Amino acid sequence: MASCGPVLVPSLLTERAGWRLNTRYLSTFLGARFLGYLLFAAVAWELGALVSIAPGPRMLVIGVVHVLLGCVLLWYAYSAGHRCAHACSGSELVTVGETKRRGVAGPAALGFLTGLSLCPPFVAAGVRAAELGSVAAALLFFAVFFVGTSIWFVPFVGLGCITRNEAVITVARMAMVLIALYYGYLGLTMLLGRKVYGY
Amino acid sequence: MKLRAKLGYAAAGVTVFVALLVPFVLYGRFTKGFAALGLHVDEVYSGGPMARTVQTGVYSIGIHRPVFPHMLQSETPFVQLDWKPVSALPGHVSDVVDVDGDGQPDLRVSFDVPKDPKAPLRVDVDALNPHYEAMRNVGKEKFSRLIVRVDDAILVRVPLAHP
Amino acid sequence: MATEARILQPQEMAPRTIGRSILLTLPIGLWSVLMFSQFWGPNRSVQIASVMTPVFMIALFFMMMRTRSTYRWRRWFFVALGLLFPVGFIHTVMVMRGTMGIPIEEMIAGRTPFCFLPIPLLILPAAFTKAVVFPGSILPHGGMSGGGMAAMAGVWLAITIVVGKGWCSYACFFGGIEEGMAAVPTRAKLRKIDPRWRYGPWAVLLAMVLLSLALFEPAYCMWLCPFKAVSEYVAARNTVGMVQNGIFVVLFAGLVIALPLLTKKRTQCAFFCPFGAFQSIFNKTSVFDVKIDRTRCSPCVLCKTACPTLSLTDESIAQGETLMSCMKCGACVDACPKQAAVWHIKGTEVAVKPERARLMFLYAAWGVAIMFGGRIIADGLATILHVFI
């Protein structure tokens, strides 16, 4: 919750109010995050590299993911400014990209990248999963881990009760830019070899 | 005068009275209140609670409980060791420390103790237990990896090895 | 709300008589003597400062009573506070540590002084883990730890209960620097400011609260606080530290010096300060506010131009209100040629006896200003006098 908060809270606030829409947003975010988890679990287990991922390559992966996360957040903040705030826009979630057809749904992109960001609880779960006998067991373990951690996201649905107006959306967009800059810095320092998160 | 206005003036009067109370009553009460909340300074800064003290002749080595970072803190898990008093330390310290109290040596910590209290310190740590990281010529790198002098003690923080 | 414009009586617009002004200033005089008797010491410079400061505060209050205006007299106090706090603080830091850079040893020892700015960032981490993510001490711990974090939090809460967001006009020991800068030019060079920049403090607050919880560090203090330039900062041990220190220098130069000079606004407060956004919440609990009497308003929007924090918009003026970000500085009230912008006590009718509301507010606000800011001014003054005496 704390590690996803900087990404999730401002992006939720740029969406239109209403707990239904927020629930849909959260579901998309969590679903994409789940995909990110499973992708990492399957690929890393198959490579036999889950336990022995050295700090160097691990930092490279995290660094690239963080830079991408920063870029998506910036693009998301820009896209939210162009979305029509009136009923004519329907209930579409913010689309990151030029058109709805070619773009990727914002929450999906953010959720997927957050899932790949290899935060410490995730790495610890990965170590545990690697001790299991088969890739199916590892995937199941990650699925259970995901469900257990996703319960912490339920309170975010309450953000749907906050009125959306120019003030809230502008604040959320500005906050997103600041957070994007920080993730960009984190990613760059990891790519330059400086350890972050102690790993 | 309407009731709302009367209440408003009453509240304003109370506020002026409360302003008088700030230095004599409120400041002290609120300070004690915050202190009584049971909060503590984050262990990455404070070094964690003391686990035990080992007496080695004229000085002692304080062994803290390991500190694990919260959330996405950019620090490694570490354990802090305190040598005190500095005045009783020899010119060169080289101690084998059993950190986890299992009777087996875990670390060999070596550092010079300069006479000038402001002189920079450097430490070498040999990890006799693979749970800890070795350190070579480390100064004040980060909160989880350093040697510093604080008052009459020399503190060494040794990172725990990766899981 | 009054349905007819109340006609101002001549005596309400003219300066108050000297006798009456002295009478109204008397309680503040007594309060000042009480507060500064505790500051008295054997040191000659401290003694002079203990006399000069209350005289200064009493004189300003007298002028507020005599002229029936608030802003320009309050501004003298606030600028003095903003200029003299760094004098006293930096002097103490240099005596105790010899450097404005906080060494890691001091942070580990819990001797980092705590200011009010990180308070909103520490709430969530403390709520979840009972850990305060600041390298200070809860209680006094020697050195620069001062009264400890509990004492700063205690004085913040006490003063906030009294003045709400008036903290930003009567207690903040940083805001006076940019208020002084904003007062220097006669005209603003940059007059068109996008009103959406007003949301900046809320965005910084949201981002810093979330990052502080995620990173478990006081993110604003580490990365963005421009006032490290006039107090202290983490001594850079590596490239990241140098980048962090570079950022605060740029922000100070831009938001606290350059932009106030160009815009005549308190730009750091209005567009950036997350603590100010947090304090805005307490404007809802404060019993005092500023209202616009729509029966008397032109609207000439001189109040909107005068407001240093863009807390008045055309919409809010039409509704007879200021925005949540109002710092109760009194600039709009003093600027209004029709006395339509008035001090107000919640629940009472707008513009009915506004001077009574102003007096009650000023007694409360000036009381805490003397207790808190006055002591800081005296300390800074004593530091300067000590050079010569």
Image (tube, coloured by chain):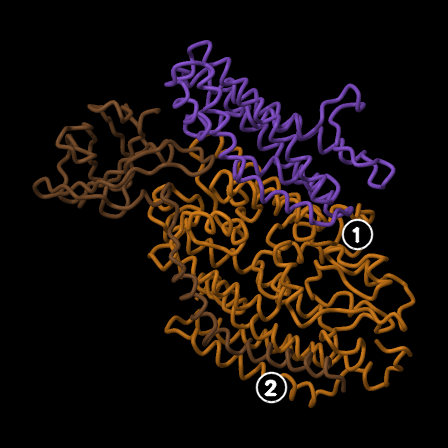
Provide the letter of the chain coloured brown.
B
Residue at image location 52% in from the left, 51% down from the top = C118
Q: Secondary structure at mark 2?
A: helix
- Picture layout, residue C148 above or below residue C348: above
Q: Is residue B124 left or right of residue C283?
A: left
User: Dot 1 lies on which element?
Assistant: loop
C306 sits left or right of B103 in the view? right
Left or right: B45 as drawn, with respect to A89 = left
Chain coloured orange in the rendered structure = C
Q: In this rendering, does residue C176 appear at all? A: no
Q: Amino acid at mark 1?
A: Ala
Q: Which quarter of the rendering shows the C terminus of chain C? A: bottom left
What is the number of callouts on the image? 2
Q: Using the image, tell me which numbered label, if any, was put on residue C188.
A: 1
Q: Are marks 1 and 2 in contact (CB under 8 Å)?
A: no
Chain corresponding to purple in the figure: A
Residue beneath label 2, please? C26
Q: Name the residue: 29% across, 41% down.
A: B118
Residue occupying image coordinates x 65% and y 85%:
C24
Instruction: Please name the amino acid that badge 2 sits on.
Output: Leu
Q: Is residue C361 left or right of residue B81?
A: right
Q: Residue C194 lies in what quarter of the image?
A: top right
Residue C9's spot in the image, x, y percent?
A: 86, 85
Q: To which chain does the residue with label 2 belong?
A: C
Give me the chain letter of mark 1: C
Counting from the top left corner in percent of width and height, residue C73 is at 68, 70
